[in-house]
Image (cartoon, rainbow, N blue to C red):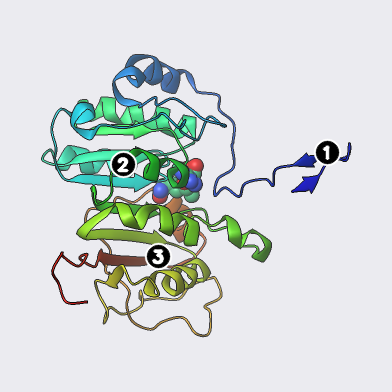
Amino acid sequence: MRADRSGEDKAPREIVSFVRRGERLTPSRQSAWDRLSDQYVLDPPRGSRDTVPGADASLDLQEVFGRRAELVVEVGTGLGENIVAAAQSHPQRDHLAVEVYRPGLAQTLNRIDRAGCPRNLRLLPLDAQRSLPALLPEASISELWVYFADPWPKARHHKRRLINPPFLDAVLPLLSDRATFRLATDWAQYAHHMRRLLDARAELELLHPAGPRPEGVTSDTLPVDLAHTGWAPRFEGRVKTSFENKGGGAGRLVWDLAYTRVPRPSVGDPL
Ligand SMILES: C[S@@+](CC[C@H](N)C(=O)[O-])C[C@H]1O[C@@H](n2cnc3c(N)ncnc32)[C@H](O)[C@@H]1O
């Protein structure tokens, strides 16, 4: 507990991986929001904050999508380039975009409109770490994507990185056996941080243990002990986003990673 100026105890501020930026919408985004948010943006009851679900919130995937299909979840969808392209090109799968940035969600609705309004996609406007474990059943995700998460480069901000133990503890139980977890970043230091945390998780196995580092030179500093192998080739379904373009423009390489969820032991398996 911290004491405020009045001397009263305050609950410690929760560490979150995002900053709330301007929420104002351009006319075109506002129009997309007005026309499509009822159909696409999920609206579970909220708890202590508007990015956290209430204790009574739940999500019935059968009811939401009208069927049960493989579920692809992208955390931090930004402007929606990847998740909308995926929903359009994989009608047999369902897709969930998790994002707290309202203008990004509105732009995603714009894209959904241009893509002919695929019905196999919904948007969840909540903090992924605090909402997914409350809303989704264990082993319900077939693919989890985190692309170009905010790098939080200053050492005192590393605790705000999305890829940290609390997020992994929240989402790894939601991956089905042999589910794929794909990540990409244009920050070598963050790529190194991801490798250290993800390689150490017993639930995960690298999909490309012999995969080489991306080719080329990078403008950022490579950690001396950065792994030489274990990197994934660019996932063919990964669309170039404005954040990837920004990294490329600054001379940074892109580090792709792919893991598979190790199958859970079945009842009767020897320990
Ligand atoms: C740097 S942007 C990248 C967006 C997109 N993936 C891309 O490649 O263009 C990271 C996004 O993650 C979102 N984000 C960060 N933490 C989040 C969380 N805990 N839950 C949901 N979204 C989050 C931010 O709002 C931001 O839009």
| Outermost residue, front side | 268
Residue displayed at 16% across by 45% down: 70
Q: CA distance from mark 2 to mark 1?
A: 37 Å
Closest to the observer: 242 or 210?
A: 210
**210 displayed left or right of 75:** left
Closest to the observer: 78 or 3?
A: 3
* Dot 2 alpha-carbon crowd within 10 angstroms: few under 14, some 14 to 19, many 20 or more: some
Q: Quadrant of residue 90?
A: top left
**Secondary-structure class at tag 3:** loop
Q: Which image quarter is the C terminus in?
A: bottom left
**Secondary-structure class at tag 1:** loop
Closest to the observer: 202 or 41?
A: 202
Label annotation for residue 116: none
At label 1, which amino acid type do we have?
Glu
At label 2, which amino acid type do we have?
Leu
Residue displayed at 34% across by 51% down: 240
- x then y, percent, for residue 77: 39, 43
Residue displayed at 36% across by 60% down: 183
Q: Is residue 271 visible?
A: yes
Q: Tell me: residue 116, above or below residue 215.
A: above
At label 3, which amino acid type do we have?
Val
Q: Where does label 1 land, which residue? A: 8
Q: CA distance from mark 2 to mark 3?
A: 31 Å
Which circle, 3 or 1, is nearer the viewer?
A: 1
Q: Where does label 2 land, which residue? A: 136
* Dot 1 alpha-carbon crowd within 10 angstroms: few under 14, some 14 to 19, many 20 or more: few
**121 displayed left or right of 266:** right
Q: Where does label 3 land, which residue? A: 254
Closest to the observer: 100 or 33?
A: 100
Q: Are marks 3 and 1 in contact (CB under 8 Å)?
A: no
* Earlier sequence position, callout 3 versus callout 1: 1
